[in-house]
Amino acid sequence: MTLLHVVDAFAERPFTGNPAAVTVLEAFPADGWLQTVAREMNLSETAFLVARPDGDHDLRWFTPAAEVDLCGHATLAAAHVVGGGRFHTRSGPLTCTVADGGVIEMDFPADPPVPAAAPPALATVPARAWGRGRFDLLAELADAEAVRRFVPDLAAIASLDCRGLIVTAAADPGSGVDCVSRVFCPAVGVPEDPVTGSAHCTLAGYWSGRTGREELSGFQASSRGGTVRMRCAGDRVVLGGRAVTVSEVRLLAAP
């Protein structure tokens, strides 16, 4: 029997932020089983952990459709379940620390975007500027309201040669955050992600360049919503947020 914890990440209270399923295994079963479980959970990510003898963990992330190279919210959820620590992943070692007040800080690789041209498939998107990170294409829109009202062409986004599309803008004055965003990744089975930690590795560099500040905060304006703290540190970025466990799932089917 396999126990999965369902955790709302980048959330101050249950049923907000981005839900991820987390399970700690004795060893990784076949990839097909991991993918089947992620599809069964049908959350944007399911995180699978295996403890190492030194106290670290190996960590892998699966969407309902594919294994991915980096996921922020499921790492936050995993750190919430096991109390922080060092995770070995496809994107290298990631260290998570539980700070004062229960905020979990994650040391991630920075992914600042480079200027890019508008892809022909998204020629109608009214972007002020385009950028390209390791995983995603970024489009800056006119203002926060344009981000909230944005209607994605999911077929066009799925045709891009990257994971997905980030749309972003400066936050509304007085909102308490620096930027807003939404993230669409239909090619990996996530039409719109509620809160995307890895996208903020790109947003941190972009908005740091625009504002001249290294410490920022962003709100992902999905229907659930969530706030991500960002601190640029050279070729790394520290992402911070809270998490709440909302349920447990027991799988009766063995690997």
Image (cartoon, rainbow, N blue to C red):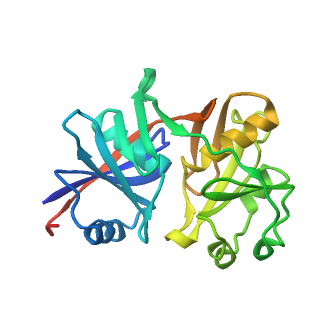
On screen, 234 above or below 92? above
Residue 207: x and y, percent?
A: 74, 39
On screen, 59 above or below 68? above
On screen, 52 above or below 115? above
In the current view of this chain or complex, which residue is farthest to the bottom? 155
The answer to whether residue 16 is visible is no
Residue name at image x 41 percent, y 28 percent: 97
In the figure, residue 183 lies in which quadrant? bottom right
In the figure, residue 127 lies in which quadrant? bottom right
Q: How many marks?
A: 0
Q: Quadrant of the C terminus?
A: bottom left
Residue 225: x and y, percent?
A: 57, 50
Front residue (pair 22, 96):
96
Q: Is residue 65 left or right of residue 82?
A: right
Front residue (pair 86, 125):
86
In the figure, residue 159 lies in which quadrant? bottom right
On screen, 132 above or below 42? above
Residue 96: x and y, percent?
A: 41, 33
Residue name at image x 73 percent, y 43 percent: 206
Front residue (pair 236, 79):
236
The answer to whether residue 229 is visible is yes
Q: Quadrant of the N terminus?
A: bottom left
Q: Is residue 236 left or right of residue 157?
A: left
Residue name at image x 74 percent, y 27 percent: 213
Front residue (pair 21, 224):
21
